[in-house]
Amino acid sequence: MATTISIENIADYVGQQVTIKGWIYASTRKGKLMFLRLRDGSGMTQGVAFRPEVGDELFETLKRLGQESSLIVTGTVRENNRAPGIPSGYEIGVEAVEVVQNVEEYPITPKEHGVEFLMDQRHLWLRSSKQWAIMRVRTTIKRAIIDFLDEQGFVNID
């Protein structure tokens, strides 16, 4: 039975079967291999699907999935220091995938967009790595301010 984990904790599960619930950030296909950049609310990692192991049906399903499609991926965690684009340094050898929701056409592409367009797509724009990092920094700053004010005896009045 696979353990459901967050990507930020993936290093603790090397050699074990895990389940990650998240989204496809990007995907690349090279022959019988499919590389999925997976993200959840805690980080990013790579899933590797090898056609002979996952079967033709699942491989074809993975080929049709769009950016930001939501998935439940089960597989075995292994170290990967070969690919510098994997922030976690670990990957999942994909064994099973449950598609929660396929996104056929994602409106935000790698090209530059105007602020007005991005604000209209704010719920999606916040998923970008830059916006995600900004939100993490803002959260850390807010937490530090609140902790400081608590230590000084201030009372939060909403």
Image (spheres, helix red, strand yellow):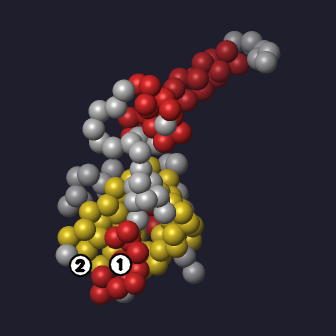
Q: Give whichever of 77, 131 is nearer the camera.
A: 131
Please state which amino acid type lies under the numbered disc 2: Lys
Q: Which residue is labeled 2 in the image?
A: 32
Residue 117 in the figure: left or right of residue 144: left
Do the residues bearing badges 1 and 2 touch, measured as CB atoms within 8 Å? Answer: yes
* Numbered label attached to residue 31: none
Mark 1 and mark 2 lie on one chain; the one further toward the N terminus is 2
Image quadrant assignment for residue 65: bottom left
Q: In what quadrant of the picture does the C terminus appear?
A: top right
Question: Residue at coordinates 56% horizontally, 66% vertically from top-left?
Answer: 100
> Could you classify mark 2 by the number of other residues whose Cα lies within 10 Å: few (under 14), some (14-19), or many (20 or more)?
few
Q: Position of residue 22 (x, y in %)?
A: 50, 58
Q: Which residue is labeled 1 in the image?
A: 59
Up/down of 40 relative to 33, above or below: above
Distance Cα–Cα, label 1 vs label 2:
9 Å
Up/down of 46 relative to 129, above or below: below
Q: Which type of secondary structure does the marked residue at label 2 adopt? A: loop
Question: Residue at coordinates 48% horizontally, 42% vertically from top-left?
Answer: 124
Residue 128 in the figure: left or right of residue 148: left
Up/down of 47 relative to 114, above or below: below
Q: Which type of secondary structure does the marked residue at label 1 adopt? A: helix
